[in-house]
Amino acid sequence: MAGALPAQQRAGLLLREIEGLSYRDIGTRLGISHGAVESLLFRARRRFKREYLRLEGEEPTTCATVRHLTTVIGRAHLGAWQERQVARHLEECSGCRSRLEKARRSALPAA
Ligand SMILES: [Zn+2]
């Protein structure tokens, strides 16, 4: 994930978090001022967090497609090919399996 950061931000973050250098030592290593180190690390952390959250929230395309086919269209209305894709995906994706199971339960009339 840190691979998405610009080189200088990545270097600053690594020197700080991995090597534990002071801001002054980082400044010396990168050839920038103390203030520049501060803003560099601030931007690096903010960017890192954004990248991390983006990856966390990303749903694999197949899961999104399967969810659409099963909950929006409904399995009864799928063509043979789509039904096969859905069945195969559900076999290997426990996340979609439990989501579908939950949806099915909540669709049942309350006893
Ligand atoms: Zn899935």
Image (tube, rainbow, N blue to C red):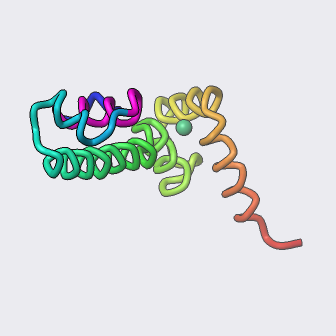
Does residue 73 sit above or below 81 in this rendering? below
The residue sitting at 72% across, 64% down in the picture is: 106
From the top left corner, tell me how far across and down residue 1 is, in percent.
35, 32
**Ligand 1 lies in which image quarter?**
top right
Q: Is residue 3 left or right of residue 20?
A: left
The image quarter containing residue 11 is top left
- Asked if residue 90 lies left or right of residue 59, the reply is right
Q: Is residue 35 above or below residue 4?
A: below
Which residue is located at x 36 percent, y 49 percent? Answer: 49
**Quadrant in which residue 59 is drawn:** top left
Q: Quadrant of the C terminus?
A: bottom right
Magenta highlight: main SS: helix
Who is closer to the viewer here, 103 or 18? 18
Q: Residue at x 40, y 33 (%)?
A: 20
Closer-to-camera residue (25/30)? 25
Q: How many marks?
A: 0
Task: Specify whether 102 is left or right of 88.
Answer: right
Give the x, y percent position of residue 23.
27, 42
Of residues 76 and 72, the one drawn nearer to the viewer in this rendering: 72
Residue 28 percent location from the top left of the image: 16, 32
Furthest toward the right, the residue is: 111
Q: Is residue 54 magenta?
A: no
Residue at 54 percent of width and 28 percent of height? 84
**The magenta stretch spans which residues?**
8-20
Q: Residue 83's x, y, as percent?
A: 54, 35
